Image (tube, grey):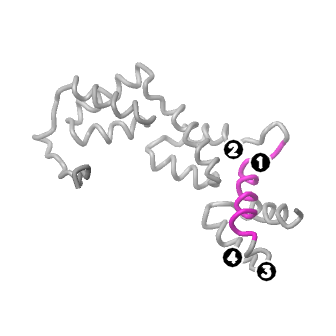
């Protein structure tokens, strides 16, 4: 295939470039495509560039506020909530992205906080999952399967119980 780019072999430290201008250009290319955390940007740059060069460019991007871990954490948390992820699953995903515990906690507190009407977004996500994906199992009397599926997704039992009750009352 002409458009297929196979996996590249990892570069040895001696083969990695130390050209800061090229690293800066690559960082801008990466950030133009998607928002990245500082750890994610460093990891991507470190594939082609020496560690010191990559660290210096990441520091420059943070200084210029092209990279902002708090903003990234909150944006990512909003996306995970929209994907009906539990708070626990969202925290795990953000940890995998290399964010610190205070940044994760702050972002999740803002995103998963109750709204003006007092509704819990995590409960809403669980109820939406029960209504869309697990309603047939619930109607077949397989409540245990629904609870198990939601627990695997990281929802706490009180949230699961309330979500199931909400869907059964509809």
Q: Position of residue 103 (x, y in %)?
A: 54, 37
The disc, 3 or 1, on the residue closer to the chain's N-terminal end is 1
Q: Residue at x 73, y 47 (%)?
A: 121
Label 4 residue SS: helix
Q: Is residue 129 magenta?
A: yes
Mark 3 burial class by Cα count in 10 Å: few <14, some 14-19, many 20+: few
Q: Considering only vertical position in the picture, is 104 above or below 154?
A: above
Q: Write down the region rendered in magenta.
A: 118-135
Q: Residue at x 38, y 40 (%)?
A: 40
Residue underneath mark 4: 145
Q: Is residue 161 magenta?
A: no
Residue underneath mark 2: 112
The disc, 2 or 1, on the residue closer to the chain's N-terminal end is 2
The disc, 4 or 2, on the residue closer to the chain's N-terminal end is 2
Mark 3 or 2: the one toward you: 3
Residue underneath mark 1: 120
Q: Position of residue 62 (x, y in %)?
A: 41, 25
Q: Give the CA separation, mark 4 to mark 2.
A: 26 Å
Label 2 residue SS: loop
Q: Considering only vertical position in the picture, is 71 above or below 135?
A: above
Q: Position of residue 41 (x, y in %)?
A: 36, 36
Residue underneath mark 3: 141
Q: Give the CA separation, mark 2 to mark 1.
A: 7 Å
Q: Considering only vertical position in the picture, is 24 above or below 162?
A: above
Label 3 residue SS: loop
Q: Position of residue 136 (x, y in %)?
A: 74, 74
Q: Give the CA separation, mark 3 to mark 2.
A: 31 Å
Q: Residue at x 31, y 41 (%)?
A: 44
The disc, 3 or 2, on the residue closer to the chain's N-terminal end is 2
Label 1 residue SS: loop
Q: Are marks 2 and 1 in contact (CB under 8 Å)?
A: yes
């Amino acid at each position: 295939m002409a458009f297929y780019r196979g996996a590249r072999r990892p570069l040895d430290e001696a083969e990695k470039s130390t050209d800061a201008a090229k690293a800066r250009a690559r960082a801008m290319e990466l950030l133009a495509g998607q928002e990245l955390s500082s750890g994610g940007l460093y990891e991507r740059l470190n594939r082609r560039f020496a560690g010191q060069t990559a660290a210096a460019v990441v520091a420059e991007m943070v200084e210029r506020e092209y990279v902002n871990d708090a903003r990234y954490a909150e944006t990512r948390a909003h996306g995970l909530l929209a994907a009906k992820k539990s708070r626990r699953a969202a925290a795990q995903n953000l940890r995998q992205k290399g964010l610190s515990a205070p940044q994760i906690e702050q972002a999740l507190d803002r995103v998963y906080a109750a709204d003006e009407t007092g509704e819990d977004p995590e409960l809403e996500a669980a109820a939406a999952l029960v209504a869309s994906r697990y309603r047939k199992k619930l109607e077949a009397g397989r409540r245990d399967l629904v609870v198990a599926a939601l627990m695997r997704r990281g929802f706490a039992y009180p949230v699961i119980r309330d979500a199931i009750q909400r869907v059964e009352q509809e």
